[in-house]
Amino acid sequence: MIEVKNIKKSFDGRVVIEEVSAVMKAGQCNLIIGASGSGKTVLQKCMVGLFEPDFGEILYNGQNFTAMKGEAKTEIRKEIGMLFQGSALFDSLTVEENIMFPLSMFTRDTHKKKLDRVNEVLDRVNLTGVNRKYPAELSGGMKKRVALARAIVLNPKYLFCDEPNSGLDPQTSMVIDRLIKEITLEFNMTTVVNTHDMNSVMEIGDYILYMYQGRKEWEGSKKDIIFSKNERLNSFIFASEFLQDAKDMRMLEETGRIPNHRNMDEMTGYRETDRKQPGSE
């Protein structure tokens, strides 16, 4: 679990984050959303220690990360995995070498043990057998999965993802979302995701923090968003008329006022096998 307590951060006298607090639990996907310039990236960088907050605390399982120095802070960082927006793979290294890099930096394992771990995480992200390929030979989605494999190779307790679906098509984005969700549950990690992708919000948003002009404007789950009356949140999430209509329909389904497609079939006695097949007439 990660606790953010009254974080404030300024640059050259300009306040970027103002008194933001949140609790992000293990075993769930914690999303930080907001328009460009809302402070979400600065908040995430404060959480991983890239920026030092002017005021407030970041607690990792009750330990005050912001007050730590030297080796104590390094030990927490060893428990953090990071999936960068552009994947940040080393172009001159193979997939195997990219994933093995953190193991070589932070462990004294034998080469065989490190290779076994590389193969294990590659299998987990469904990329078995690509060890010898270079990043230039991979698709955008494959690069993201390699970067995810590298992020989890040290068995982190905390996983940070910065715009994991940036530059991906909708179908590939869903694959990455599912992998992040599955890995979070499987290893009971505290996962923190910065995203602009509203599909991610509605699919994996166990906890969602909406930032507006450096402040926490709203927090809740993906289900809470459907019923939210916060005008700023609604205009950000459901910006188009189509998405607003989708929100209205989901609200009606959730309250039971209209049946969803599955319930409609049950109510009418209609079955999938009743659908006409080509050539059945």
Image (spheres, helix red, strand yellow):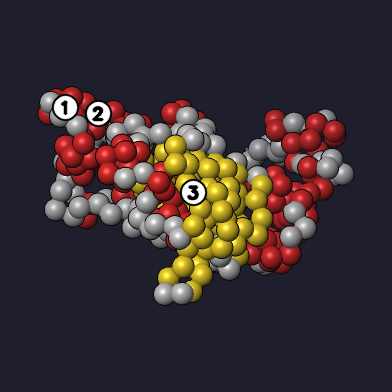
Residue at (31% x, 49% y) in the render: 143
Left or right of 91, for residue 151: right
Q: Amino acid at mark 1?
A: Asp
Q: Is mark 3 in CB contact (under 8 Å) with mark 2?
A: no
Between label 1 and label 2, give the one nearer the viewer. 1
Q: Which residue is mark 2?
A: 117
Q: Which residue is mark 3?
A: 57
What numbered label is drawn on residue 109?
1
Considering the numbered disc 2 on the image, is that residue within a helix, a strand or a loop?
Answer: helix
Q: Amino acid at mark 2?
A: Arg
Q: Amino acid at mark 3?
A: Glu
Q: Is residue 195 visible?
A: no
Q: Earlier in the sequence, mark 1 or mark 3?
A: 3
Between label 1 and label 3, give the one nearer the viewer. 3
Residue at (18% x, 39% y) in the render: 105
Q: Quadrant of residue 237?
A: bottom right
